Amino acid sequence: MQTRRRIKWAEIVLILFISITVVGCLKSTEQPIPTEETAGNEETVEEESIVVEEKVIVEEGCIATPKSAENSEEQGYTEVEVFFATDRNQLLPGETPKYFGTERSDLKYGVCYVSIPRDHRMGELEAPGRFLFWRLKEDPRYHIVTLNAEVLPSDTFFEHLQSQIMNCDQKSALIFFHGFNVTFDDAARRTAQMAYDLGFKGAPVFYSWPSQGKVALYTVDEQTIEWSQANMRQFLEDFFEKSNADNVYLIGHSMGTRGLTRALIEILREKPEIKTRLKEIILAAPDIDADVFKRDIAPQIISHGENLTLYTSADDKALEASRIVHKAPRAGNSKFGVTIVPGMETIDATGQDTGFLGHSYIGDIYSLLSDLYALMMNEHRAPERFGLECIECREGRYWKFKE
């Protein structure tokens, strides 16, 4: 009886530790709404480069761009069109969270529009601040806001997606799979922000599985991502069959990498012909057992000739909490050793300004966004990227950001 009580108390302590440590897994930059006098006074090199990228994309007609580019100066923000797939339950207007809930449902496809403020800073996910327990009202002039989300029939969705991809010279698509403690709204905003900051010349897409969006429900999310794997596979099969995208970039974050990698391995095993269209597989802070990843996951992906990049960090407090819970190191946490697999490029982001948790750096950090740009847009492998230095160790080689 005493042993059982000790185990129960240990579980409670671990849940409390996760709740304290992992809050804000998908970081938002909370900002008060500026006044008309102060808005737009601060200009940075990053902001200027964003404007340049926006103009280039608009001229080429790709969709990671403002929906209303001509009126963006007038209204104070631009709108990015983002495609989505989700197996969340759909909510009625006015219900919270926005658009989709946390219950499991059938697979749905759709499109949403997300605002990017005119004075957006690269790497920031601008959001309204809080007053006591209340979040202040969103304003698309100053915050990244999901303006709407519409579910479309599957045929209509892929016709629209296909037409947008065909407008781009490279026929490219970026597909983002989010991690735990993330709502549909969070995922939409992050996808739009990354595509915009990268100047991505193609269709931005995300898959939103029914994460509970609460830190304390981490174990519920673990069960849910396992349930969603079959739907993720169905979505990827539909995408490769119906989208006509020639260059597909898959980006998985945190717990989302579990469903993505397993679904992808199954598809590659049964439909190896899709490998010619997979440009890059990027796993950021994967919450996967490191030993399982090195033995069962990475080698299977690499064996099909795919380009696989892993971003890891020793500063990741969320994955450190996961390590304690599971009593096993995580592939995305380099605190007790960098995850190295022959044929995979591992990038160690330790020491970068990754914020308190150090977990959502995939879209937050200028240096990492620059590295992603060199990888995705310039097609530079790790040895060619200026901001990285090679580290040789007993297990092999990896790269880290230069200090």
Image: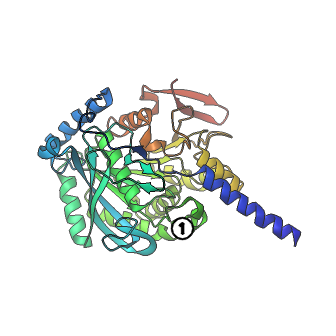
The amino acid marked with disc number 1 is Glu
Query: Which residue is the site of mark 1?
Result: 226
Q: Is residue 76 above or below residue 146?
A: above
Colouring method of the image: rainbow
Q: Position of residue 132 (x, y in %)?
A: 48, 53
The residue drawn where x is 60% and y is 39% is 315
230 relative position to 314: left or right: left
- Observer able to see residue 276: no
Q: Which residue in the rendered view is the most extreme toward the left?
A: 70
Foreground: 174 or 217?
217
- Observer able to see residue 245: yes
Quadrant hosting residue 194:
top left
Q: Which residue in the rendered view is the most extreme toward the bottom?
A: 106
Foreground: 315 or 265?
315
Q: Position of residue 301 (x, y in %)?
A: 50, 53
Q: Which residue in the rendered view is the most extreme toward the top?
A: 403
Mark 1, Cα crowd under 10 Å, few <14 / some 14-19 / many 20+, is: some
Foreground: 271 or 55?
55
39 relative position to 237: left or right: left
